[in-house]
Image: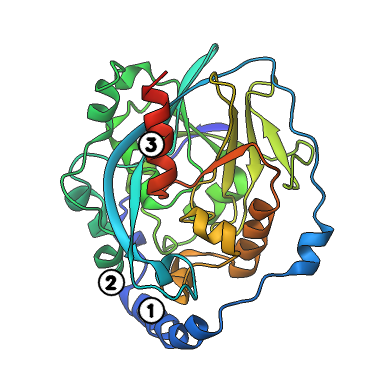
Amino acid sequence: MNEPDSGADTRSERTPTLPTVLRCCVALAAVPGRFLWPRRPDHALLERLEVRPLPTASTEVRLTVLTQSTMSAAAPIVAEGVRSLRKIPMSMGAFLVEHPKARFLIDPALCAGVHERVLPELPFPIPTLVAPDKPVLGLSDALAAHDIAVGDIDFVVPTHLHWDHVSGLLELPSSVEVRLPAVEYDWAMSGSHAPVSVVRGPLRGRTFDRFELDGPPVLTFPRSKDLFGDGSVVLVDLAGHTPGSVGVLLAVDDGSRVLLAGDAVWSKLQIDLLREKAQMPGQLFDADRDAAFTTIHRLHALPDGIEVIAAHDYEAVTARAAGSAGL
């Protein structure tokens, strides 16, 4: 379905501050207990998971990392129950994918001036929790560093519609289409108030191609969509963090298979240990904690040879950026 969204005033759509503060308090109260006794892995689920064949790819794509900013969080916040107060660096940015038929972005993350242009749309205290470090490299400048103009982008695929995965739309022409599952659009754009961590401003005036993940199971994931029909770009179901969260499985031209996992996890540490994000802020940002935990199990059960890159996993993102630069 292709249709432009209206340009309604987003100020009246902000999530009310008081309910958000109350949710923060409830989540904080649960942190000490879950730090000592984190949620246990579901070994029965792991045994039930079937690993389907990796899709055959007749085409390959080029993947370029566009790092725009960083931040950090304590290890027990990223992976619940980790007995360490070390700070884990976190990346914020977009991914440029070049296919023979199109040049597109996975997660058009940040715009220049995001602190002033986007964060005020979020309810207190969310901006204080999520603000990226300054300076922030705007999306157009990040693209220009690779000799790409914003007008060269054919479409975007957000892994989900949280603010830090779509704010860069403010720097892209309105003609650039947003492709995403219908359930994600409905969750983010329906109702009088946006969900926590969703800003509707960057999404206004956009044309959306809303689709279903109606393809077969892929690897450990129950549903998929082959974007070009050649196995090079396959979207997989990572529901939980948001209802329509997707991962993007790429056949990259260096011979690797890369899964861009959005915010299904914040770090590979969660996959290795089978740990949720901490209750605070996980209860705020994960729409369905049970489904999100199931998705972590699906990531844990992936076969060797799949390079999982979560959007904020600084180590994974920088390793891929360094590898791409060396090609």
Query: Where does label 2 land, which residue?
Result: 125
Q: Find out whether the residues at labels 2 and 1 contact each other: C-beta distance under 8 Å.
A: yes
Residue type for callout 2: Pro
Across and down, in percent, residue 322 comes to 37, 31
Disc 3 to disc 2, C-alpha distance: 25 Å
Query: Where does label 1 land, which residue?
Result: 24
Across and down, in percent, residue 31 comes to 44, 83
Which numbered marker is on residue 94? 3
**Quarter-of-image position of residue 40:** bottom right
For the residue labelled by badge 3, is the local secondary structure a helix, a strand or a loop? Answer: strand
Of the two numbered discs 3 and 2 in the rendering, the one whose residue sits closer to the viewer: 3
Viewer-nearest residue: 54 or 203: 54
Looking at the rendered image, the quarter that the N terminus falls into is top right
Which numbered marker is on residue 226? none
For the residue labelled by badge 1, is the local secondary structure a helix, a strand or a loop? Answer: helix
Left or right, 149 with respect to 5, comes to: left
